[in-house]
Image (spheres, rainbow, N blue to C red):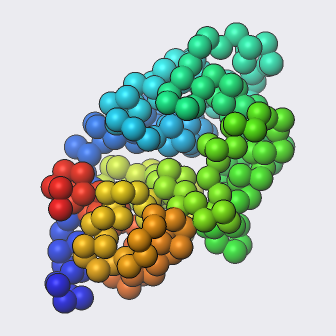
Amino acid sequence: MKPKELKEFLDAKAAQYESRSFIDDDPILIPHHFESKADIEIIGLLAAVIAWGNRKSIIKSAWRICELLEMNPAQFVSEHQESDLEALPHFVHRTFMREDLQFFLRALQRIYLDKGGLEKAFHHPEGIKSGIEQWRNWMLETTHAQRSEKHLASPAKNSAAKRINMYLRWMVRSNSAGVDFGIWSTIKAADLYCPLDVHSGRVARKLGLLERKANDWKAAEELRRNLFNLDSEDPIKYDFALFGLGVFEKF
């Protein structure tokens, strides 16, 4: 397709898939059941971190986390004692286990009580990559098992950080379509990166938006540059198009 045709095609697909009907089978369903900023961003992060595998399984596990946090994520994070964490029952979602959840809750408590919250954790004057690394470093200031570090993506180590980029989309993009939340104002939608996985990567390569073969941070940067050329204010809206084409249309 010529550049104009490609933009028109992807604009139409982005509009098609960015709809409320998209929510029902997506992990973003979970934070939509909360109203306060802190509740949304905390449970949103936990849902995003476990968002790999079957989407029904992801949603089921994320709901289980909501129950463990007594349906009050922000209150639990800010007020829990170590005894509350020790009392948490068995939990596992693929390789994310009870021990990892306990670590995340300890680290998030520190971020909220001592650092100013998640929005501040991810905001960095040098951009998204530095913001993700800052959040990761702040999390790792809390005592943790080595195994938990695999749940903290690092663009500096060339990880595509797919789930964290998805989470940032949720928090930053406008809620005008009723899908994303738009509750963070310190990060611009124009600076976001597309969550890159096997589906979006395959479609992007087929459309000539991505040449790099690996789905890593360098590929995410290449894809962002090409999507930015299509829409410099909201390049990540094309995440809906790439995802929909890949998962639903087997493009």
Q: In the rendering, at what x and y percent does residue 154 appear?
A: 65, 58
Q: Quadrant of the N terminus?
A: bottom left
Q: In the rendering, at what x and y percent does residue 215 appear?
A: 45, 64
Number of dots carrying numbers: 0
User: For the view shown, which residue lies furthest in the front direction?
Assistant: 213
Q: Nearer the viewer, residue 249 or 87?
A: 249
Depicted 133 relative to depicted 50: above or below: below
Depicted 222 relative to depicted 164: above or below: below
Image quadrant assignment for residue 208: bottom left
Q: Nearer the viewer, residue 140 or 202?
A: 202
Depicted 192 relative to depicted 39: above or below: below
Residue 64 in view of the camera:
yes
The residue under the point 48% across, 20% down is: 64
Q: In the rendering, at what x and y percent does residue 132 appear?
A: 65, 59
The residue under the point 71% across, 72% down is: 125
The residue under the point 77% across, 33% down is: 145
Q: In the rendering, at what x and y percent does residue 115 appear?
A: 80, 48
Q: Quadrant of the C terminus?
A: bottom left
The residue under the point 18% across, 69% down is: 12
Q: Is residue 250 left or right of residue 163?
A: left
Depicted 126 relative to depicted 100: above or below: below
Residue 183 in view of the camera:
no
Q: Nearer the viewer, residue 97 or 238?
A: 97
